[in-house]
Structure formats: structure tokens, C-alpha cells
């Protein structure tokens, strides 16, 4: 196992900057996610860590050793891609054993290693099958087994679940996390899906346009987003963002969205600077919805329901607030009726404020 330190990684393809001064550390035996939309630079960064490409600037360290001139084999990297890339003419056993045969291990050792990793990943009963006889989830497990059977220092996963259906993805998330904790491996995992990051990662690097917008422990990034992009990208649902005016009334800090006013004096010590206008953010899961005016909550206002989406035992309620869609996530089946008037409430401690011009957070983390 190994820690990986990225320092000032920059990569260009012609005039396009794929990575722009990327720096963060993947701790030994940790599960770190690179999260970002297509084109953020996730795959390019993994390829540089693997040694498949070199950066134009910056350095990659394994522990404290620079590895710029080491090949992928010398770095001891295992990599799983979005496409499973199994050999269709080989059995599951032979697919997994292929890197061991390339390393010229004896047949007894090959059988032992393949058997051990197949049993751990619960594919030991599939070893005689061909890839075309497997489900998507089974093929993914075989690809993981092939990457892990050699025993690598670090494992790189490039969107491995993106082509799987919802139920298999849900199951595989739990298996990935369990695998990492039991084997104590170092994993760097790239994904466009924020649910992957929230479900599995210890730390997260949120990327956009080749830059790291924020890096840190997952729940710290989730609760204290550095800017509007992080607030709206990391989460099961995007943070509700509204314009607001910032006023001082009798020594109190008042936020006025036009739909409601709220005394935000409790936030004063957390706010770095105050302008006359700001962006007001509240996550849908921090919002409560009731039929009657609630007793609890710093913010309370009535709004008309547009639609309710029932998703299993949960519901996403869509409201229109000042010509914007405002969402609430309710952990119960509560579809409501379109046009129904309902009360929305939440606490000021869950509110985040952002600079209206730059989108940067106005609050201390």
C-alpha cells in the first residue's frame, strides 16, 4: 500500500488545459473519489497517476518518492476502466489469471491467487464461464479481480459503475467500500456520480474544467461547500439557490429573498464578508414540508406545489418560489396534489451564503 501526493499537476493538449495545477494527497489505505462532470479531467489525472501519461508540470509522489520516470509496472498500479475489456475467448479463470501468467508465476500459485480473489469477490462459482454468459455486475467483478490479483500498491478505478443498471450499481457501491475496508487497499476512484462519492469515499476531490474546486473529507465538503458549483454538484439533489438581500435592522442580520425574511444573526461570526446582495443556499434534505404552519423552523413560508415525485419510500417535492424551482426531499411517500398550498420550513444553521458575482462561499468552513 502507498500514499499518493499530487503536486501542481498541469497537462495540456494543444491549447486545451486538461489539468490546471492539481494538488492533493491520497492517504495510505484510504478511499478517495475524484468527482466531476465529463471533461473535468478525471481520466487524465488517473492516467498520470498510473504512468500512462506524464504531466507537463508538477510531480507525482508515491509515499515521498517521485515516480515521473517509472513505468506503470514499476509503480505497481492496478487499474479498472469504464469498459470491462474482458477477453471474450477466455474463461473467467483465464481472464483473471492472465496478468499472473504474464509475470511467469507457477500454475499452483496462479490457482491459489485466482481462487482467493474470486472467493472474496463472490465469483468463485463463475470461473469456468465465458464473459458472454455473465451479467454486467459479474463482468465488473471479474475486471476488478483481474486488476487486484497481482497485488498492487494502489488501485485506480475510472467510472467502473457508469454502465451498470441502478440496482447493480447500488449493490456494487457497498461491495467496493467493504472490499477497501477489509483489504485496507489504497483506492483512487473517478466518477461523475455524487452518490458514489457520498456512499463510498473517505475524502473527495471535486473537479471542474481541470481544476480542483474543493478537496477534503466527504461530509466536510458536503456541509461546507466552497462555492456554488460544489453545493449544487455534490449531493443527491442540487442545493436550492436563491438571490437575497443582506440588511442590517437594529443590529440584526436580516436575509431577504423577496419570498421570506429571516434573522440570520446566528451566522454573523461565520460570515467572512457582507455585501448588499448574496446567494442563499439550502439543501432539499434540510427542508421540512407540512400542511399547517409549523411551530419549528427559523424560516417558514407557504408555497404552491408543482409536482411530487415518489421514489420508493421517498418523495421529491417541487415548488415554485419567485420564478425558480425549489425542491424538498421528504423521507416518506408524500406526493401531494399539484396546486396544493404547503408550508416550507428550515433552520438558519443549515443555510449557506455565496458571493453573487463569484459564487464563492461567504462563510467559514
Image (cartoon, rainbow, N blue to C red):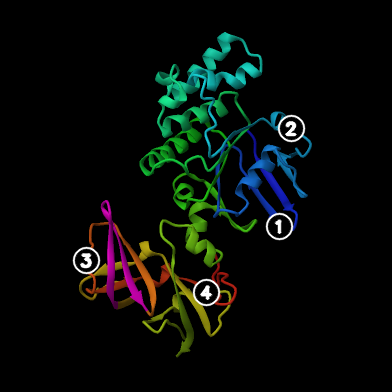
Region rendered in magenta: 302-321
Q: Identify which residue is drawn at 53% across, 43% down.
A: 159
Q: Nearer the viewer, mark 1 or mark 4?
A: 1
Q: Nearer the viewer, mark 1 or mark 2?
A: 1
Local secondary structure at mark 1:
strand
Up-down relation of residue 103 to residue 138 (above or below): above
Dot 2 or dot 4: first in sequence order is 2
Q: Which residue is mark 3?
A: 336
**C-alpha distance separating marks 1 and 3:** 48 Å
Relative image position of residue 363 (x, y in whole percent): 54, 70
Q: Nearer the viewer, mark 1 or mark 3?
A: 1
Local secondary structure at mark 4:
helix
Q: Is residue 202 visible?
A: yes
Dot 4 or dot 3: first in sequence order is 4
**C-alpha distance separating marks 2 and 4:** 51 Å
Q: Which residue is mark 4?
A: 269
Amino acid at each position: 500500500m502507498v500514499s499518493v501526493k499530487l503536486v501542481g499537476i498541469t497537462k495540456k493538449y494543444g491549447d486545451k488545459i486538461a489539468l490546471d495545477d492539481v494538488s492533493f494527497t491520497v492517504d495510505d489505505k484510504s478511499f478517495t473519489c475524484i468527482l466531476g462532470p465529463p471533461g473535468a479531467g478525471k481520466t487524465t489525472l488517473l492516467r498520470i497517476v498510473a504512468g500512462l501519461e506524464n504531466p507537463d508540470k508538477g510531480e507525482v509522489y508515491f509515499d515521498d518518492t517521485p515516480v515521473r520516470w517509472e513505468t506503470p509496472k514499476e509503480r505497481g498500479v492496478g487499474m479498472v476502466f469504464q469498459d470491462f475489456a474482458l477477453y471474450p475467448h477466455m474463461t473467467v479463470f483465464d481472464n483473471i489469471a492472465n496478468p499472473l501468467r504474464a509475470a511467469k508465476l507457477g500454475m499452483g500459485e496462479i490457482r491459489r491467487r485466482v481462487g482467493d480473489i474470486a472467493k472474496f469477490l463472490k465469483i468463485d462459482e463463475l470461473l469456468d464461464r465465458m464473459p458472454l454468459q455473465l451479467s454486467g455486475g459479474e463482468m465488473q467483478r471479474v475486471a476488478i479481480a483481474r486488476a487486484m490479483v497481482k497485488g498492487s500498491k494502489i488501485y485506480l478505478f475510472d467510472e467502473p459503475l457508469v454502465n451498470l443498471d441502478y440496482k447493480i450499481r447500488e449493490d456494487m457501491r457497498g461491495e467496493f467500500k467493504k472490499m477497501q475496508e477489509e483489504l485496507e487497499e489504497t483506492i483512487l476512484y473517478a466518477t461523475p456520480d455524487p452518490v458514489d462519492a457520498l456512499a463510498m469515499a473517505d475524502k473527495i476531490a471535486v473537479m471542474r474544467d481541470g481544476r480542483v474546486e474543493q478537496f477534503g473529507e466527504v461530509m466536510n465538503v458536503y456541509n461546507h461547500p466552497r462555492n456554488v458549483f460544489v453545493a449544487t454538484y455534490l449531493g443527491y439533489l442540487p442545493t436550492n439557490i436563491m438571490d437575497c438581500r443582506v440588511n442590517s435592522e437594529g443590529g440584526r442580520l436580516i436575509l431577504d429573498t423577496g419570498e421570506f425574511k429571516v434573522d440570520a444573526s446566528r451566522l454573523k461570526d461565520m460570515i467572512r464578508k457582507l455585501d448588499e446582495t448574496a446567494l442563499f443556499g439550502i439543501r432539499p434534505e434540510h427542508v421540512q414540508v407540512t400542511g399547517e404552519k409549523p411551530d419549528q423552523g427559523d424560516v417558514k413560508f407557504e408555497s404552491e406545489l408543482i409536482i411530487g415525485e415518489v421514489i420508493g419510500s421517498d418523495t421529491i417535492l417541487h415548488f415554485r418560489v419567485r420564478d425558480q424551482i425549489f425542491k424538498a426531499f421528504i423521507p416518506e411517500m408524500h406526493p401531494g396534489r399539484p396546486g396544493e398550498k404547503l408550508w416550507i420550513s428550515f433552520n438558519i444553521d443549515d443555510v449557506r451564503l455565496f458571493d453573487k458575482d463569484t459564487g464563492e462561499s461567504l462563510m467559514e468552513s
